[in-house]
Amino acid sequence: MVWHILLAHFLADYPLQFSWILRNKRRTLFVAIHAGVHLVMTLLLVGAERGRLWPYLAVLAGLHFIIDVAKNVIYKLRPKWVVVPYIVDQCIHYLTIWILAARIQAALGDIAPPFDPQWAILGTSYLLAMYVWYISERIMVYASPTYQAEVQAQYLPRMLTRGALLTLLLTATSVPRTTALAASAIAILPYVGKHRWRALLTDIGVVCAIWIFFRLATG
């Protein structure tokens, strides 16, 4: 069940964190709306077991709200802190998910997932490679305006390229290195601008790391 909850987290924290929420994220009401989206997504992805799981998922949403409010307080005190609060915020979210999943396992035993966990892992992998990395990179390079501008300008072709590269790596059971090289040659096409080589090498590295994550997570 942990993979289903983690997939819900990535969906709610990235593609479903709409621009109007982001614009108002420093206001408590909108943090609460954001936490509510997380709750709805987890309830949807845990399937028919939501009747037993909803108290735990409500606690998780409440913790998400508290963590995000605390992050806002840090931003007010240290407005120049951008990268570290983002990384710490995400790590704490992942930690609370794993702790909650362990607590559910201890209290309720094995929970029948609504679909194979491997599909949840696969969905998480594609989200990480495509959309999550786009947002994360944009935040992490805020100190380099020219590179950040290229990240935003090329987000769609780079996103699609990372998805294609991940697909090639996942389907290459016997010749992953050959496939990676071929994908790298293809991946160079949408990369333009001053920082094109940095972007290309970064994307290849990120996708390879996510491919390793997928292999480890699926055994």
Image (cartoon, helix red, strand yellow):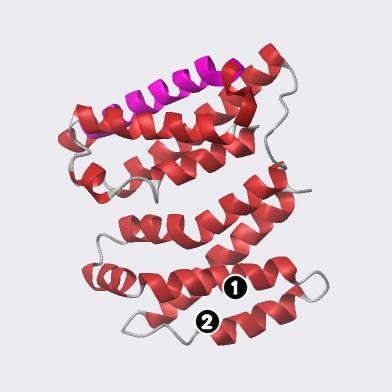
Tell me if 173 is positioned left or right of 68 in this view.
right
Q: Are marks 1 and 2 in contact (CB under 8 Å)?
A: yes
Is 106 in the magenta? Answer: no
Tell me if 75 is positioned left or right of 41 in this view.
left
Q: Which residue is at the front of the view, 29 or 205?
A: 29
Location of residue 55 in the rendering, given as x and y in whole percent from the top left corner: 51, 15
Q: Which residue is at the front of the view, 212 or 15?
A: 15
N-terminal label among 1 and 2: 1
Magenta span main SS: helix
Relative to 23, say whether 43 is above or below.
above
| Residue at x 51% of width, y 35% of height | 94
Relative to 63, say whether 22 is above or below.
below
Measure the C-alpha gap from mark 1 to mark 2.
8 Å
Relative to 109, say whether 28 is above or below.
below
The answer to which image quadrant residue 7 occupies is top right
Tell me if 179 is positioned left or right of 144 in this view.
right
Q: Which mark is residue 198?
A: none
Location of residue 23 in the rendering, given as x and y in whole percent from the top left corner: 19, 46
Direction front: furthest residue: 48
| Residue at x 29% of width, y 27% of height | 32
Write down the region rendered in magenta. Answer: 52-73
The answer to which image quadrant residue 5 occupies is top right
Q: Amino acid at mark 2?
A: Ala
Relative to 62, say whether 212 is above or below.
below
Is 64 in the magenta? Answer: yes
Q: Which residue is mark 1?
A: 165
Q: Which residue is mark 2?
A: 187
| Residue at x 46% of width, y 18% of height | 59
Q: Which residue is at the front of the view, 162 or 114?
A: 114
Direction right: furthest residue: 174
Location of residue 38 in the rendering, given as x and y in whole percent from the top left corner: 42, 33
